[in-house]
Image: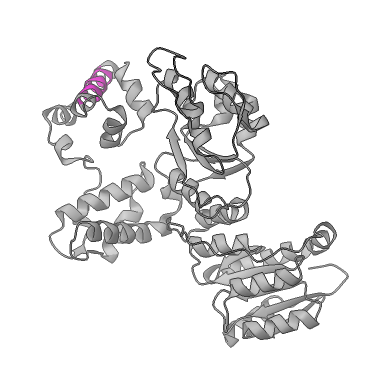
Amino acid sequence: MNDNLEKTILLVDPDIDYLDWASKHLQAEDVRILRCDVADKAEKVCAKTDVHLVIADMKLEPFDGIELLKRLRATNPNLSVIITAGFPGTAQIIKASQAGAQDIIGKEALTFELRGAVEEALSTVEALNNSREEKSSPNAETDGRANIIGISKAFQDVFKVVGRVARTSAPVLISGESGTGKELVASTLHTYSDRRKNELTAINCGAIPENLLESELFGHEKGSFTGAAARRIGRFEQCDNSTLFLDEIGDMPLQVQVKLLRVLQEGTFSRVGSNDVLKSDVRIVAATNKNLAEEVAAGNFREDLYYRLNVVELLLPPLRDRKEDIPLLAEYFLQKITKKNGMARIRLSGEAATFLQEHHWPGNVRELENTMARACALAASDTLLPQDIPIGVAIRKNISESSLFDSFLDLRSTDSNVIEQFSKKFAEYALEKNNGEIVNAAEELGCKVSDLKKYLTL
């Protein structure tokens, strides 16, 4: 805060002690601090005073901080606003970001983050005044809710970006390890977009054979290939004015990548077997657990398509890097599972929560959910203790009791060929058990379709 011109900061919070602390914490020679404890008074102050930055609590009277943010930016779109909240949820973060908040900071982190956020906000005031000409109107409330839980900074940073880009049409690339919640993030992007009235469509690019994926996406004409008994309308036509989620985009064949690139560049495509050029307004959200930059270097993914998809990148942190979220997620899954199955409420003990936080969670959130499902099934009381949580047990009881799986537990050899042969037999067993449905087999084993295919070809 070393600009020669004085900057005015308005603090809005019902907690007088917090106002006292924040006033002293932000005190500087070039800063003037104003204070309010209610939202309507803050609105009047901003109408009469040249305020550069507002720091407002989420919970205010007679209307909340997001409503204050909307009203202030409706009259002054260049005004910077920081929202504070006690452990803000993902829905709050998204709505505040959509309404134009400069930042959203949890009150538990204010001591460490507030000054830096204020420095950044004030340093961009002049640039904002010069670059923003149009007034922003209040955003309509969405009926949807973010169904992902997290209070960690790494996870909340993701949803700040979600809030900013949800209502644009920019392609989004979601990357992260398997099980981190990429499909849920894609669903949340759609839920908070202007396309939410139409249904989100999801396709797993690794689960559909190469010769059928092109038809699945773009459709085909009758007789265009063997078995094409009738015209098929592809997903791009079905998704007009909606969102298409392409999961496991790194597994998309190069031939299909060419047609996808054309859609992203020109907004046009043709059905298989047709020369007719069709148009469709589709927002693409793609996801991968691969490093696409490395795939490009290896020649497995088109560089031009990579840059077209990667307009906005969301990197989801693994569960081991957001340990503070683990007890919240575990409690959420316990409530969800017991309610779905008509069971009595089961709670997590403090010791069990610590036990869960100490686990590495290679399968991320998906592994945690499966673990909570097993714990519910085996629970002997309404409170889970560490010994009640079967971490590392097979996902499905019928699989874990199979003689084939038991033989794996008895393996003592480190010979890679032995392990490969077992993996292949186990994959074949799972596929046979699921009547050849590879997606169901992979889901039952808790692995990706691409991995299961790899085991089958060993």
The quadrant in which residue 47 appears is: bottom right
Q: Is residue 228 above or below residue 200?
A: above
Residue 254 picture location, percent across and down: 54, 19
Figure disc tally: 0
Q: Is residue 333 visible?
A: yes
229 sits to left or right of 97? left
Q: Is residue 94 magenta?
A: no
For image coordinates 48% across by 40% down, the residue present is 176
Residue 16 picture location, percent across and down: 59, 87
Residue 450 picture location, percent across and down: 38, 26
Closest to the observer, 167 or 290: 167
The quadrant in which residue 342 appears is: bottom left
For image coordinates 56% across by 27% down, the residue present is 294
Closest to the observer, 349 or 376: 376
Q: Main secondary structure of the magenta part?
A: helix
Residue extent of the magenta highlight = 418-429
389 sits to left or right of 189? left
